Image (cartoon, rainbow, N blue to C red):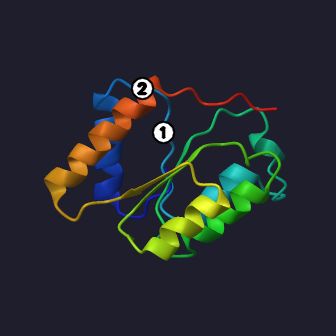
Amino acid sequence: MIEDDEGHARLIEKNIRRAGVSNEILPFANGTEALAFLLGPDGSGEVSSGRQLLILLDLNLPDMTGIDILEKLKLNQHTKRSPVVVLTTTDDAREIQRCYDLGANVYITKPVNYENFANAIRQLGLFFAVMQVPEAD
């Protein structure tokens, strides 16, 4: 999970857990740390070869845009098949289309209202509970 808002990160994890998903969730508050984990120190992405990854990605991060991260992940042979769920407050149609063009699997706009946001995340957790993550090459 790449999310700089600690409150949103806790809410996301809580509702994913509530839906019965027990997979490990690794939180990253910025793109630099997330990319270091996903692509490794050499940037090759080989470190993620064989990992079962599902990436929750905020677009508005303190050090880079989520679009930059999405682009790097989808261009890398070791991470390009990892499902990416964009979870952000940005609802600009061009930005949404750009994310899908780059290979995002799902784009969810975070509602500003807390209750609506919590409900959207609960539904996302239920989706994860039944979704199959593709095998790595």
Q: Tell me where residue 125 sits by quadrant.
A: top left
Q: In the visual, does 77 lie left or right of 8?
A: right
Mark 1, secondary structure of its residue: loop
**Residue drawn 58% across the image and 59% down it:** 100
Q: In the visual, does 103 lie left or right of 11?
A: right
**Residue drawn 76% across the image and 52% down it:** 40
- The amino acid type, in three-letter code, at marker 1 is Ile
Count of all numbered marks drawn on residues in the image: 2
Whether residue 52 is visible here, answered yes or no, is: yes
- The amino acid type, in three-letter code, at marker 2 is Ala
Q: Position of residue 133 (x, y in %)?
A: 60, 30
Q: In the visual, does 11 lie left or right of 136?
A: left
Q: Position of residue 10 (x, y in %)?
A: 31, 48
The label on residue 25 is 1
Local crowd size for mark 2, using a 10 Å CA cut-off: few (<14), some (14–19), many (≥20): some
**Residue drawn 36% across the image and 52% down it:** 9
Nearest to the eye among marks 2 and 1: give it. Answer: 2
Query: Between marks 2 and 1, how big is the CA–CA gap?
Result: 14 Å
Closest to the observer, 112 or 8 = 112
Which residue in the structure is indicated by mark 2?
129
**For marks 2 and 1 on the same chain, the one whose residue lies earlier in the sequence:** 1
Whether residue 61 is visible here, answered yes or no, is: no
Local crowd size for mark 1, using a 10 Å CA cut-off: few (<14), some (14–19), many (≥20): some
In the image, is residue 60 above or below residue 74?
Answer: below
Q: Position of residue 32 (x, y in %)?
A: 62, 66
Q: In the visual, does 91 lie left or right of 80?
A: left
Q: Quadrant of the C terminus?
A: top right
